[in-house]
Amino acid sequence: MISVLINIAKFEYDIHSLVKAFFPKEDVKVVTEDSVPSCEEGTVYRVHYEATEFSFYEGDTLLGTEPVKPDADRIDEKNAVKRLVYKALSARTGKTLVWGDLTGIRPTKIPRKMLDEGKSDAEILSYMKDTYLVGDEKSALALDIAKCEREILKPLRDKGYSIYIGIPFCPTTCLYCSFTSNPIAMWRDRVSEYLNALKKEIDFTAHARAGQIIDTVYIGGGTPTTLSAEKLDELLSYMEERLDLRNLLEFTVEAGRADSITVDKLAVLHRHHVTRISVNPQTMNQKTLDLIGRRHTVEDVVRAFNDARTVGFDNINMDIILGLPGEDTAEVTHTIDEIVKLRPDSLTVHSLAIKRGSRLYEWILNQGYATMVNTDATMAIAAEGAERLDMKPYYLYRQKNMAGNFENTGYAREGAYGIYNILIMEELEPIVAMGPGSVSKVITREGRLVRSDNVKDVAEYIARIDEMLDRKKELFSLE
Ligand code: SF4
């Protein structure tokens, strides 16, 4: 247990994320000094703020200070305290973090904004290093990706928006899952009710945003292909009737798990002009697939991928996860070699994130952290595989509690980029999200990004669909 006591009720979240990045296996608590005196167990650090500086202590020993400029705003203060905590813990533990003290999930936003302001590469790289202590390699990666994103997003239309639709059902629940996922077997009888609720959201959006251009559509989940071919056809036909999908830049359906993909379903997607799908193995090692509860074989993945090609898909993504239990360089090398043989058009490499509430979290408590490895070496194997596939990195995001404190990176060959993937990270245009647990985001007249969440539970979502529409109405009124 690590406790961090602070004397101002600010930046708890940022300090927590950073301390946790240094001590991923420990429980970390960040509390104000006067609120919970009983938390002083295990290692106790203290962050003390006075008008001109932050100080950081372990017990009563001062580990460092960081000055705060007299005219500092909240961001300057936050950057100062994070730099202090990072430098002190780095000196104390001998560890460096490749992303420095950056704990946010969108590190490429920083270089992209600076590029928009006309800053040079050198200015951006030194800012990343001096302000956030990011290593040279990751600074260069973030800058490269920011440049790539700007090119990919050029075709976006003025006042365009994107649509997300969630299908919250899966064949079974994966060990590491933290998404909105429900076993389809338990919900099969209520799928029509669910689609009816979705249709209400589609109608509302079509009406409220009539005349606006839709840039991209993304159907994710869950696993959209848990719907039968008939139900997929019903949903996609309804979307075509109500929404103007003729000028889409991209239409993605995350087919996802091989145990849900059939030729019939692929044919329905293709007939409805879906341009990009995902067939996600996560690993090509059967032992791991069994362990993480995917309930399909490696051969199923190969079959689903080849079927998708035969049906006519020329833009297929594959997702893999590094840091899965029991996997090290040999297993990752095998996965990458098998994927290279299939030649997908894009490859998304996730670093396993350990979320409280996932079965994985419980599993780790029993089995121990040592079973999970994600290192520079496994990241390099994946990057080198992407290179063999003539792909380059085009989007990147981070999550809390990731194995190895790395990042998720999307690689794609030229022209096969996932535009929606960038939009969801860079938050440059409205995203209207439908389905339980989905989050809509718009940009207000004052230029602020605001969001509205749908309830997570499927039954609640169906029962309270009119309330979800009211939330959207309120959100759209801010634009
Ligand atoms: S396929 Fe995805 S959404 Fe479904 S259970 Fe597995 S991780 Fe969760």
Image: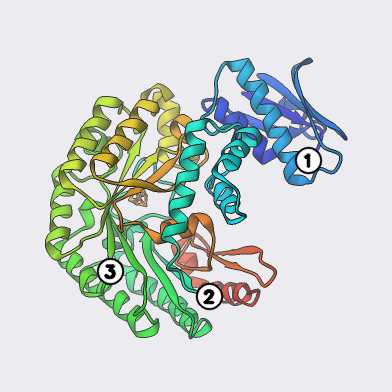
Disc 2 secondary structure class: loop
Q: In the rendered image, which residue does mark 1 sit on? A: 9
Whichever of labels 3 and 2 marks the residue nearer the N terminus, that label is 2
How many C-alpha atoms fall within 10 Å of the one at disc 2: few (<14), some, or many (≥20)? few
Whichever of labels 1 and 2 marks the residue nearer the N terminus, that label is 1
How many C-alpha atoms fall within 10 Å of the one at disc 1: few (<14), some, or many (≥20)? few
Q: Considering only vertical position in the picture, is 215 above or below 387?
A: below
Residue depth check, mark 1 versus mark 2: number of the one nearer the observer: 2
Q: Considering only vertical position in the picture, is 123 above or below 182?
A: above
Identity of the amino acid at label 2? Lys
Q: Where is residue 411 in the image (x, y as percent from the top left)?
A: 34, 47
Q: Which color scheme does this rendered protein use?
A: rainbow
The one of 390 and 221 positioned closer to us in this rendering: 390
User: In terms of image quadrants, where is residue 448?
Assistant: bottom right
Q: In the rendered image, which residue does mark 2 sit on? A: 159
Q: In the rendered image, which residue does mark 3 sit on? A: 274
Identity of the amino acid at label 1? Ala
